[in-house]
Image (cartoon, coloured by chain):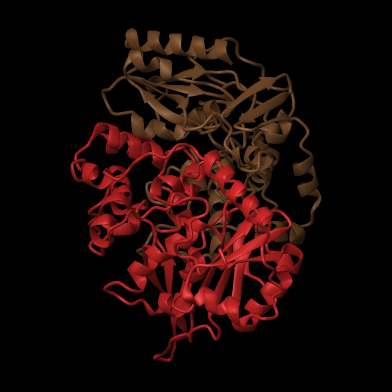
Chain colours: A brown, B red
Amino acid sequence: MADVEQVLRETVRKLLQEQKVCRVIGYARGSSALRSTPVFIEDEKDADSLVFDITCGNNLTQYLKKCGKAGDGRVGIVAKGCDGRAVVQYIAEGQVKREGILIIGIPCEGVLDHRKACDKTQGREVSEYRIEGEKVVLKGKDFEVSLDKFDVLSDSCRRCRYPSPPVHDVFITEPKEAASQEPECKEFDEFEKLDASERWAFFENEFSKCIRCYACRNACPMCYCEECFVDQSNPQWFGKSTDLSDTMIFHIVRVLHTAGRCVDCGACERACPLGINLGLLNKKVEKEIQERFGYTSGLDPDETPAMAAFDEEDKQEFIL
Amino acid sequence: MSDILKLDKKRLDKFVAALLSEYRLFGPVEANGLTRFAEVESADALKLDSNTDESAKGIFFPQVETILTYENGKTETPSGPDKPIAVLGIRPCDARSLLMLDKVFGTGKYNDSCWTRRYENALIISVGCNTPRAGCFCNWLDLGPFSKQGSDIALTDIGDALLVESCSEKGRGFLESSDEIPFRKPTDDDLSKAAGVREHAESSMEDKVDISSIKAVLDKSWDSSLWDELAGKCLSCAVCAYLCPTCHCFDIQDEKMPGTSRGRRIRIWDTCMAPQFTKEASGHNPRPTGKKRIRQRVMHKFNYFVDVFGEIACVGCGRCVRSCPVNLDIRYVIKRFMDAG
């Protein structure tokens, strides 16, 4: 990724120099070799702090609404495929203006699920890592482990079709074509084979771990409501406890609210401190939307989102 | 040295049985891909070789606790536990955090009966950290992977056996009265193994940073521009606060069963990172921005708590470091203030 990083830094430096953007949202090295952290660059001298590699998992799109002040100029955003799709969805939903955003596309080969890497190293500090073909080698004080990259990739990256953003203004190196079809995902196929009660039991088990920290919601670019339904207090719609009925209702309403909008970036799942499998539920809903309404989120900024459109031909056999 | 006993790991069941005869026993249990504290009834359920994903505070200060129930205008408060609580396999960082929480809920100005009835007679049995994890920084807080503060009994894992050491009168009393536990006398080899394990654990941690001046630095940092920078990336979620063994803020909610006169009053964890935390009934919110909220959390731990209780409200367990979704690493935050101050 070194070349990509060089080109990225040079590109951002130039964009800032030429005042094509007022700031750039990107990634900097975090506090350990396996972590990156969001960074906001306004001074071209800081462009060298930008990094891009397998650790850059945050979906930066959610910062667009925080970062863009009126009259400031365009905001640049370093966008993997899924970040780019979230930006497109923002444009389609009228959350940002296309001309206010400069999309810096970057080719993505999937990002690390930090928990998976941690499990493989028994939680020990990884001081450096390197990619060797399809292997990731993690090195610490007194150990070195070589792992299949696939095994430590985020689940959403394993099934990703769109490694590059569908829309971009500049691209760091060359965009990668979208795959003609979704990569096979055994986990999802097996999940789909379950009947309704088995799926319910699966999610009961997952959501029983939830501590209502809302990291999933807050890391999600599509959860941009000014006030979330679970936070409303007058009236208060839902209970605040971790009783299963309360946690389930939160997750169910959230997934319905992101139906046809979720870009399957996996930011929610990576943000969860307790490793709740949120991706399968998101993916299932995404597939339902595709099958019923022929809509895939985050591909075309000019297409009306599925939940904002009505067509008499829409399938509606599910309406009781 | 005479206080140190040895217990073969395969006889841990006897230790657990002795505990169960007097206590409700909690310990780290692996289930559903996580290691969490849960009530246990046999030694087989215990997972002593790694720290828990969540802290131990929930044993004494549950995330959701019913403080009263009501029906037809009559209220009832739940009774306390029938047996005192023992915790086996807590790490030194979490054991220490309980002392801090006790200052807030137990021995300080206020006595919180929900806390006291669980913690007051509890037996805390810690196990030293042979392998501190990435992000652990207890050594910054005058602790270490084998600290004994807050423990009644401290265990050291030396492979096939545990060394068992009492650290309080309560701990000593339990060990002396438990004849049925087949303790042995440790050999010199066992003791040197334990010393080796300790040394390896301590040297595997990153270097200690002296943060003793952090309170004074923060006294002058109220208007620092660093708060804006931190708030810029903070997601305002509750990962840090809910995984934290010392965060102790709570909310109280009344829940009525629709269509009945029945309901319950619950106490639930709350977090200063949430915008609703300080929202008043009038709609006014004195801490409306992320900047003010993150400042509150850092100040509470590293400044106000020092003012009130004379110590930093952090034990360096590293859970927030490992789990913050945007890698807003508290070690980095503290270092930045120290460097600027």
- Work out whether B265 lies above or below B62: below
Question: Of B212 and B324, which appears nearest the observer?
Answer: B212
- Work out whether B62 lies above or below A165: below
- Work out whether A76 lies above or below B334: above
Dividing the picture into quadrants, the one containing residue B13 is: bottom right
Across and down, in percent, residue B164 comes to 61, 65
Residue appearing at x 47%, y 30% in the figure: A30
Residue appearing at x 29%, y 42% in the figure: B291
Quadrant showing the C terminus of chain A: bottom right
Dividing the picture into quadrants, the one containing residue B104 is: bottom left
Residue appearing at x 66%, y 56% in the figure: B188
Question: Of B61 and B138, which appears nearest the observer?
Answer: B138
Picture mark count: 0
Across and down, in percent, residue A61 comes to 46, 31
* Camera sees residue A283: yes
> In the figure, is residue B299 to the left or right of A88?
left
Across and down, in percent, residue A133 comes to 73, 19
Residue appearing at x 45%, y 24% in the figure: A26
> In the figure, is residue A304 to the left or right of A312?
left
- Work out whether B21 lies above or below A164: below
Across and down, in percent, residue B285 comes to 25, 55
Quadrant showing the N terminus of chain A: top right
* Camera sees residue A236: no
